[in-house]
Amino acid sequence: MTVFNDMWAYLTNGANWTGGDGIAALLAQQLLLTVTALLMAMVVGLPIALWLGHLGRGGFLAINISNVGRAIPTFALLALLVVAPWPGTGELGPYGRAGLATLIALTLFALPPIITNSYVAMREVPSDVREAARGMGMTGAQRFWRVELPLGMPLVMSGLRLALVQVWATATIAALVAGPGLGQVITDGFFRSNYGKGIAGALVVAAVALVLELLAALAQRSVDPTRRGARVGGRADALSVQPATVDQPAESVG
Amino acid sequence: MTLLGAAEEPSCYSRLVNDWVCADYVSDRQQEIVDATLQHIGITVVSVLLGLVIAFPLALLARRLPRLESAILAITTGIYTVPSLALFPLLVPFTGLSATTVVIGLALYALTILVRSLLEGLRAVPDDVRESATGLGYGPGGLLMRIELPLALPVLVAGLRVATVSTVALTTVGSLVAYGGLGNLIKDGVLTNFRAELFTASVLCVVLAVLLDLLLVLLQRVLTPWTKGAAA
């Protein structure tokens, strides 16, 4: 297949990686976009979802927000933001052209998995554990910080992991509105019939998605309080990421 | 809509006004909008059905051979981490700039959700039900088609709903290869700064997702009348 030869040639040519619109710069830009959007979504979504979960209210909101989020195409949302007078296509520092619009769209996209998982994480703390904590005389804040949050942490983290990989993958769509990130390599190669370049970009995005998924799985393992105590010296085992990666239900992609 | 009125003030979708919400746009470009919507529905339905057709044997295989299960789940989850914008160009060298490219890509995404929900649904069938059926003389085929699948239907439809709604949203990215249904209008709206077109197409996307979702809920009600009492 000549396309794959072209792809290999593109990837192995050092000149394609360096410079302002080289793969390395775009990769860094997309990582920055992903991390910023995820942090913004965490700042907005985590406190609300955890608090509602702690109180046991607003379950309807938490469950339905992911259904609503799934129905709104990120491309349509991004297109609306770009064409609107604000935020428009303005440059935003290292985030590039249409940076603010992309950040807003990605943040909204990251909210549903974070909110749903955090809420469910709080609700799934066994009620006898909750009651025992209350019986010991713990206040609401103490129960939240010392019982519910540590026990719910793995599920909260799995929501963050899902959001991270989805935001990374979806960030490529910014290229459809001439925005920042690695999507540029894909669409550029594609529209100039340079399929080798397009596929090279796709390969880089997919590879980084897998790396992020594995890293997030490792992070998720490390915060599981029940796993640490259960096995002494099981460090090597705890680092194997296979089951946690496989058992995750997929939600939606970009 | 009189000539006089048109002369006095420009249409709400002219360059000068460029309104977001514009009824004139919808009535004047009706044909274009209907065509895009039909293409959107067509691509979505064919993709989900193709995904279901592939998911079915995969789920049965995974159930028969537990060793294959984690491999099948890992591969389908792996496909899911490939962004749609990357998947379509990956397929173009093989399938060209055609609706096939979009359908195959979307079917692969739907597959992930459907294999999972099929497996979960079949696993949720109680063992004693299975044993009673075997005792009544059902063979493996009859057991699957007449006992297990009907009982797995609620979980399967839940998966179908997720897959369908996501596919409606993802179809818009197909505009990359010019087969994106309403996504084509969205893309054109961005390129030409045409607000009415962009807004109408975006709203139609969401409406379409909600309608198809409702349709599947109704379908499940019809197919599994015994769950009605329990759900209410």
Image (spheres, helix red, strand yellow):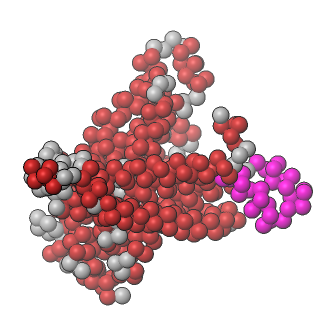
**Foreground: B14 or B180?**
B14
Quadrant in the rendering for residue A1: bottom left
Whether residue B164 is visible, yes or no, is yes
A232 left or right, relative to B40 = right
B214 left or right, relative to B192 = right
Q: x, y (%) of residue B13?
A: 18, 54
Quadrant in the rendering for residue B173: bottom left
* The residue positioned farthest toward the right in the image shown: B136
Residue plotted at (31% across, 64% down) = B32
The residue segment tinted magenta is: B126-154
Residue plotted at (48% across, 37% down) = A63
Screen quadrant of the C terminus of chain A: bottom left
Main SS of the magenta part reads helix
Please tell me whether residue A151 is drawn above or below residue A87 in the rendered image: above
Q: x, y (%) of residue A37?
A: 27, 45
**Foreground: A84 or A113?**
A84
